[in-house]
Image: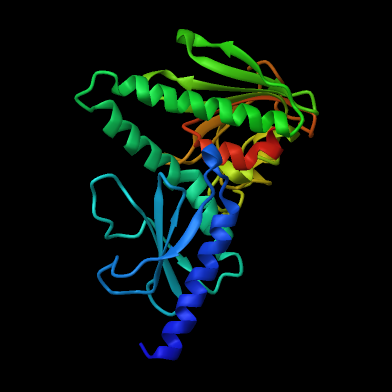
Amino acid sequence: MNTATATLATQTVSGVAKQVAALLPSRRNRPWTVTPQQGSLSWGSDCVRLSDGARGVLVAQIDTARLGVFAEHPDEYTSEPDVVADIRDPDVAGSIAALLLRSILPRRDREADRVTGHAPDTSGWDQVLTRRMGDLMEVGFQIIDHGSHPQACEVAYAAPGLTWTTGQGGTWGLWLQGRSAHLDVCYDGPVSGLYGVLPSLLPPAEGRISANVGSVFTRHLTDRFPQLLPIGPDEVNLPGRREPSGFIALPEKTVPTDHTDHHTAVIGEFRSVGADLLLAAAPHLV
């Protein structure tokens, strides 16, 4: 690569990385920073590192059209990209940030939890639960900052949690899910209360077309979000496995499915949602 091309590539990689960093929330008041990273990857690409002090992500130019995003893992050499993005995409930074929030950062947190939880020190899982309780409280303060008033509660198996009411009259619940220390979210309210947050929970819709099947209720959702999967006349599922999973359904099997509008009452459950995503999505949760 000649000097002019290398300089241009470095500026492009750094510029994209800085945009990504600006889209990621600062957990524990630790902002994401961007620094040059030399010799990190085998092909010697122009590379920068995003870090919040506890986690790191490498962004490198693979070729003239593609960026590779590599999450750093505990005790593991980073060799394969977690995602490859088209640098020509006008919103490449937004696409990378969305995947980090939805999938890569929660997975990185779970890996760190496993390392801590299986340490010889028997207090390992207590440390994990303390970290996740910190996440729960941090999300709660963010909800307060956006005008709602979360209340502490306990759900099944005495799992600690928070509940709050939205301006539309819906109710959100957030709780710590057992020893796995995952954050799970539930919703009970008008279906329109989910419109703002679903784009954060779902993979991109590009290339997906609504199948135009199912009931009026399921089509009401899949026409807006073709990523959703109808599994019956009264329920749709999120498609993710490594990403947030869950469902949206009518509250009772007896509720008619042949009429739906923005006020239709639904229930929803979303599992294994990352704390970073919840902090970023807080404006849509109130």
Examine the rendered structure and indicate whether residue 182 appears above or below residue 67.
above
- Report the residue at 40% width, 47% height from top: 55
- Report the residue at 38% width, 91% height from top: 2
Q: Position of residue 137 (x, y in %)?
A: 57, 25
- Report the residue at 51% width, 63% height from top: 17
Based on the displayed image, in which of its 4 quarters is residue 36 positioned? bottom left
- Report the residue at 56% width, 70% height from top: 89
Residue 213 visible here? no
Q: Quadrant of the C terminus?
A: top right
Foreground: 65 or 74?
Answer: 74
Foreground: 252 or 192?
Answer: 192
Q: Which residue in the rendered view is the most extreme toward the left? A: 120
Q: Position of residue 35 (x, y in %)?
A: 44, 63
Colour style of the rendered protein structure: rainbow
Q: Position of residue 217 (x, y in %)?
A: 69, 33
Residue 131 visible here? yes
Examine the rendered structure and indicate whether residue 153 appears above or below residue 127.
above
Side of 213 where 113 appears, left or right: left
Foreground: 256 or 55?
Answer: 55
Q: Position of residue 8 (x, y in %)?
A: 49, 82
Q: Quadrant of the N terminus?
A: bottom left
